[in-house]
Image (cartoon, rainbow, N blue to C red):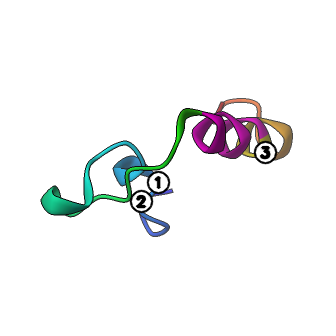
Amino acid sequence: MSDLDLFKITIPPELGGHALRALDIVEIITALGTGDGSAG
């Protein structure tokens, strides 16, 4: 997950993050949880 920068999805771009919307974050976590239950 760190290789994909998933830990930066809520950080503003000014600070080196991606600043995704809440709905996008939920979709990402749901997809990760589907593939690996311990991830989401």
Q: Residues within 10 Å of mark 2 (few under 14, many from 20)?
A: few
Locate residue 4, reporting x and y percent. Answer: 49, 67
**40 sits left or right of 8 in the view:** right
Image quadrant assignment for residue 29: top right
**35 sits left or right of 24 in the view:** right
- At horizontal 76% and vertical 35% (from top left) the residue drawn is 30
Q: Are marks 1 and 3 in contact (CB under 8 Å)?
A: no
Q: Give the position of the C terminus as an image quadrant.
A: top right
Q: Amino acid at mark 1?
A: Leu
Locate residue 14, reporting x and y percent. Answer: 15, 61
Q: Secondary structure at mark 3?
A: helix
The reply to whether the magenta stretch includes residue 16 is no
Locate residue 11, reporting x and y percent. Answer: 28, 47
User: Which is more foreground, mark 1 or mark 2?
Assistant: 1
Image quadrant assignment for residue 34: top right
**8 sits left or right of 23 in the view:** left
Q: Residues within 10 Å of mark 3 (few under 14, many from 20)?
A: some
Between marks 1 and 2, how big is the CA–CA gap?
6 Å
Does residue 12 sit above or below 4 in this rendering? above
Between marks 2 and 3, how big is the CA–CA gap?
16 Å
Locate residue 5, reporting x and y percent. Answer: 41, 62
Does residue 10 sit above or below 14 in this rendering? above
Mark drawn on residue 31: 3
Q: Are marks 1 and 2 in contact (CB under 8 Å)?
A: yes
User: Which is more foreground, mark 2 or mark 3?
Assistant: 3
Q: Earlier in the sequence, mark 1 or mark 3?
A: 1
Q: Amino acid at mark 2?
A: Ser
Mark drawn on residue 2: 2
Q: Which stretch did the figure color magenta?
A: 23-30
- At horizontal 47% and vertical 54% (from top left) the residue drawn is 6
Mark drawn on residue 6: 1
